Amino acid sequence: MIRKLSWLVAALLLALAAYCGGIGWQLSSGLKQMVTVGGPFTNRTLQTRDPLTLDYDGDPQRAFGWPFESVSIASELGPLPAWVIPPAAGAGDIWMVYTHGIGGRREDGYRVASVARPLGITTLLYAYRNDAGAPRSPDGIY
């Protein structure tokens, strides 16, 4: 009886290990697909009507008539394009750096910049690796 119980426990532990391994492999594959260029979050159709939507395509001047400066930020893969948007008034001594999410774009920061600019905050919107106009990473992962 004890021998059968030992085999049953061993079989259950083996099944549990196989199940957990399978789930881990599935999760790993799914997560890698989400953070890789061309993954499920990057197939957005861009438009130019409403700058406060997440699919807007255009610089701050085109979006709102805001002045801006195009700058580059050094990175290990090469220069990252960025926009510096000065505040509507004031010295702009306080800065906000906006980083978009996976599959996002620097234009996604317009909603935050539209609040920061009237408050006298300078805003930096930048593109990171694998974004349009930015260097590509060899492995294609953001």
Image (cartoon, grey):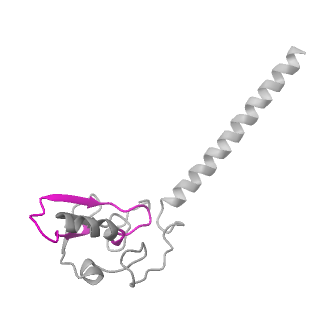
Residue sitting farthest toward the top: 2
* Residue 31 drawn above or below residue 40: above
What residue lies at 85% left-to-right and 20% top-to-bottom?
A: 5
Residue 132 location, quadrant: bottom left
Tell me the magenta residue range: 79-108
What residue lies at 62% left-to-right and 48% top-to-bottom?
A: 25
Count of labels in the image: 0
Where the C terminus falls, by quadrant? Answer: bottom left
What residue lies at 49% left-to-right and 75% top-to-bottom?
A: 44
x, y percentage for residue 49? 39, 85
Residue 57 location, quadrant: bottom left
x, y percentage for residue 137? 38, 62
Is 103 contained in the magenta span? yes
Residue closest to the eye, 106 or 32: 106
Is 96 contained in the magenta span? yes
Image check: 91 left or right of 75? left
Residue sitting farthest toward the right: 1
Image check: 93 left or right of 76? left
x, y percentage for residue 35? 48, 59
* Residue 87 drawn above or below residue 31: below
What residue lies at 52% left-to-right and 56% top-to-bottom?
A: 32
Where the N terminus falls, by quadrant? Answer: top right
Residue sitting farthest toward the left: 91
Residue closest to the eye, 35 or 125: 125
Residue closest to the eye, 94 or 37: 94
* Residue 46 drawn above or below residue 14: below
x, y percentage for residue 52? 37, 74
